[in-house]
Amino acid sequence: MGVEGIGARVVRKEDKRFITGKGRYVDDIKLTGMTHAYFIRSPHAHAKVKKIDSSAALKMPGVVAVLTGQQLVDDKVGNLICGWAITSKDGSPMKMGAWPAMAPETVRFVGQAVAVVIAESKNLARDAAEAIVVDYEELPAVADMRAAIKPGAPQLHPEAPGNQVYDWVIGDEGAVNAAFSKAANVVKLDVTNNRLAPNAMEPRAAIADYDSAEEHFTLYTTSQNPHVARLVLSAFYNIAPEHKLRVIAPDVGGGFGSKIFIYPEEMVALWASKKVGRPVKWTGDRTEAFLTDAHGRDHITHAEMAFDANNKIIGLRVKTYANFGAYMSLFSSSVPTYLYATLLSGQYNIPAIHAEVIGVYTNTTPVDAYRGAGRPEASYLIERLMETAARQLNVDPAQLRRTNFITQFPHQTPVIMAYDTGDFNASLDAAMKAIDYAGFPARKAKAKADGKLRGIGVSCYIEACGIAPSKAVGSLGAGVGLWESAEVRVNPVGTIEILTGSHSHGQGHETTFCQLVAERLGVPISQVSIVHGDTDKVQFGMGTYGSRSAAVGLTAILKAMEKVESKAKKIAAHALETSEADIVIENGEFKVTGTDKAIALPMVALAAYTAHNLPDGMEPGLKESAFYDPTNFTFPAGAYICEVEVDPGTGKTSFINFVAADDFGRLINPMIVEGQVHGGLVQGIGQALLEHAIYDANGQPVTASFMDYAMPRADDVPSFNLSHTTTLCPGNPLGIKGCGEAGAIGASAAVINAITDAIGKNNLEMPATPDRVWRTIHAA
Amino acid sequence: MYQTTYHRASSVDEAASLFAKGSESKFLAGGQTLLPVMKQRLAGPSDVIDLGRIKELQGVELSGDTLTIKAATAYYDIMTNADVKQAIPAIAYLTSVLGDPAVRYRGTIGGSIANNDPAADFPAALLALGATVKTNKRSIAADDFFQGLFTTALEDGEIITAVSFPVPAKAGYEKMRHPASRFALTGVFVAQTKSGDVRVAATGASQTGVMRVPAIEAALKANWSPSAIDSVTISANGLLADIHGTAEYRANLIKVMAQRAVAAAR
Amino acid sequence: MSTVKLTVNGKAVAVDVEDRTLLVQLLRDHLNLTGTHVGCDTSQCGACVVHMDGRAVKSCTMLAGQADGATITTIEGIAKGDELHPMQAAFRDNHGLQCGYCTPGMIMSAIDIVHRHGGKLDEATVRTELEGNICRCTGYHNIVKAVLDAAGRMKVSQAAE
């Protein structure tokens, strides 16, 4: 590898603008004549909107317009969609309740917009919003999943009797029943996977600018996938045809899934911009983020695992209730089904699995993909089951895992996924060595003597990333393909622009993607720039989520690079009067092997564009594009072990050590990969110890600010001890598996396994707050 | 934030007269509580009278056995003050765990006690140390000053000018932080006066705000040691309960924090 | 409306603003210094931290009027031309940022931490001192590393001056 090539710890090119305050986020942008939007949101979890009186507001200073949900209907703006069709076990399609961007008739969660004020400033818009009188007729609400599915519960949508979205199954129930009938031991567990608020630090924002002469819209938005946003806004919401809508996602301050989706606010901003004839800006505040950003997780699960007399797993039975909130968000339906149940085999050889997933509507904020999306829920369930089993069967938890590890690849699980490669023993070995697993009993005894409760917890996760082969996801109900596109432009002076459909909102693409070019061409990364996040510049792309940008997006760049290199070699060979097969690329030069004859890249590029002396029949120019559709998911996996100490007086958990051994295949920039793991681990620890988005029984959110929702802070979490084991992914030419979500997928089970080990009680829900841990310690 | 008129007062008298002129005036010290409340439009004062730059409200004085902290002294300046650290190190410690560094630069002792948030730290120190609140009109004993949630003995327009603490023989403070807000989930201040009396105050725990804890006071009067509290029973009745702590948990924390505060007392 | 006079990043400015204007709004909306961010409504996240008269304060929790007459330094004002402040350089070199949104506030707080603690910083102290700054991307690991690294660099650069 070169100093800037694959595998090098290159400091990030994009950092200079962020550390000097020159980042350009949506709220930093001002347009001439720009107005400001403030949404009037329902204070009720469930109510009829009877009347909206905006007469007083319209007379207030600076007010440009007040627009309501009924006007959206009148203008035939489409309802929000869910892009993945799931079929219930009885063959019926999932039950979709209509979700208008502003509610004309019925609100179904606190924070749902009913109207918007457009004014000269945000303060004036908010002043006017208080003068708008909305007459609501409150309806009975239900926020708890268990209550929502009971007979007689308040009903959210006429389309969904019993508040059921779907009742979906996967796996062979007969085979599972047969396995359980011959089991030597059965381990049962009930777990709740707590609802989380994603809380990217940059609140969502949008600026819409309508040009009436061109009938053209420009939308600046906080999006992880601006092309998908444009597609949905065009094809489903009737905002504008694609060629009349430019979507720009500039610097975006974190996403974690929450900025995949197309939200009501950007739809309304576009529509309102045309209505008022001026640019419209909306910037959410943190409370709005809590109320309206799609939440994550929120499962209730009962699971049973059958073991034979040798502690080998012979069957797994899972029943999960998944809370979708009040409406089906863009990719929500896929999360507890194809992103969750297909990972229930974990790292283990389980011959028979059956899972049933029941999706439920409640009067809460919609739930969709949040870092890991289904896979953290699966990993948490399996790893809590394994720990519970080890305790019940009285075997070492690491050994029980080894007994059941998949060791032969490829491995077809009973739940769709075909694992391509891996070495689960290697990562567990690395983690156990890093934490001195063998020395733990002595450390526990010493801590006990000091009045502290010491525990150790293992979590061996696997995830399916690099989403995904388009044909496969299409057959499972996805409404889009999941390839990626790239274009490589070599300019006449030899500098290079890479246009990618991936979007960076913290992942460092502007650096890692350049490293591939440096690796292949031997040019410094300063000569390469990455262009992304603008539908006018990049032709199409599927965006960044599901740990896919390196495995899929970078592979697309590689494919385009190969085409560019092939053409450049022909030009070089022609200029050097040799055959193309004799040309090698080194240090930015095209060399004739075995000679000192060479031509530098800028000269090849110039030749391509002057076109004075190209091979016969060759088109001028040096620019190629590629679309790459992966052949399989990728399967990052690893072992996390943490050691904790619990203060029996307060129930507070402190970390003694946290080790992570991951197998991500090939690493492009280990520094950036480690950063992704650190961040993921803390989101997983946050779920385990701190975070919980809570509603009261009537659907009122209890945690709608950082005063109530506990975000992990620097003193809540440890530094980490990371290592990597490597099996290259055979599914893509670079051998990459993806690293963006691993930490969030694997960490929470390790933490809960460690705390329950420390306190000697197995049942402990997340988040393991000091209060909850203290009560569990002292429960009879 | 609603429209408001901002005034910067240069003296306590000027502040009082500016306050009287406004229809619904509010005093602003560090603003670390008032401004977030105003931003959420939960308060909409017609006039905001800034006390932050009034010279006579700044500083710390140690005179004999009395430590006086002027009302608009920022937490950071209290925490780093040599007299505070020498006379009542528990106050310096309390200030070091109050809020975060940026809040400590702006927040003031006067602002904290005037607001009397049930989870604020300083009310516990005042109550346990038997402090006296000085205003532009009178002196008020801490026992009389705190009158329930967000309620104090202050009259409309009355300005806190200083707090005087009798220097104790020993004092200590420990708190369990609220996992989200970082206020006190429960904090306990213990003090042994130079005459041998013991006063203990808990914040963050009671539905009625900061409170004395007589059972622990009695136990410590008999035996000033953490183990003296082992046998004390704290009732959960009347204690706060929320998503971060049940009443039973807070009752437990009163004991545990008191024990740790005694162990740390100097 | 009031006129607020300030020195911002070494430059004297006078701005007419509504009395309800927050310092962060004055900086972002009136002076176009958009490096200072807003991440919450409750004074918790620290994305808005700037230095006022040498102290790191939350500019979302101050009225602009309270800063009248003060000297303000924002993230845009700490580099000397092309030469990064050692804290900026340490954040870059240690990969102490990802999406960059919390970064300006982190850096401004971190400089203040080093000013107060000098060379006596350790990991636990840095973590405690970062209580008022929330990051969702980095897990804090590399931020802590960056602050410790910068503490060494700032000592060296002070010694050189």
Image (tube, rainbow, N blue to C red):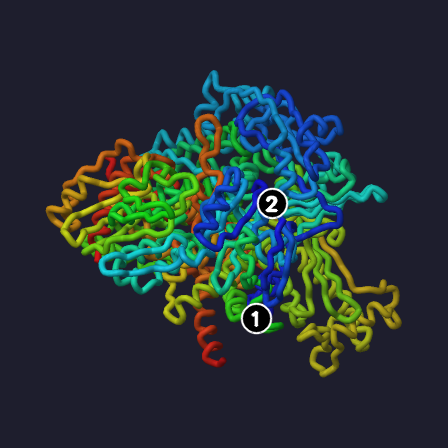
Q: Is residue A30 above or below residue A321?
A: below
Q: Residue A476: which quarter of the image?
A: top right
Q: Residues within 10 Å of mark 2 (few under 14, many from 20)?
A: many
Name the image quarter holding residue B117.
top left
Q: Is residue A367 left or right of residue A308?
A: right
Q: How many marks?
A: 2
Disc 2 chain ID:
A
> Residue at image x 31%, y 60%?
B61
Residue C84 got which mark? 1
Looking at the picture, how far across and down is residue A598, in whole percent? 74, 79
Residue in the foreground of this view, choosing between B3 and C45: B3
C-alpha distance separating marks 1 and 2: 30 Å
Between B178 and B95, the residue placed more toward the observer is: B95
User: Where does the N terminus of chain B fall, quadrant-wise?
Assistant: top right
- Can residue A636 be seen in this snapshot? no
Residue occupying the point 74% across, 76% down: A600
Relative to the observer, which residue lies in front, A639 or B244?
B244
Q: Is residue A54 above or below residue A558?
A: above
Where's the C terminus of chain B, which quadrant? Answer: bottom left
Q: Amino acid at mark 1?
A: Leu
Residue A278 is marked as none
Q: Amino acid at mark 2?
A: Arg
Q: Is residue B225 left or right of residue A48?
A: left
Whether residue A624 is situated above or below residue A139 in the rendered picture: below
Q: Tell me the residue that label 2 is attached to.
A: A204
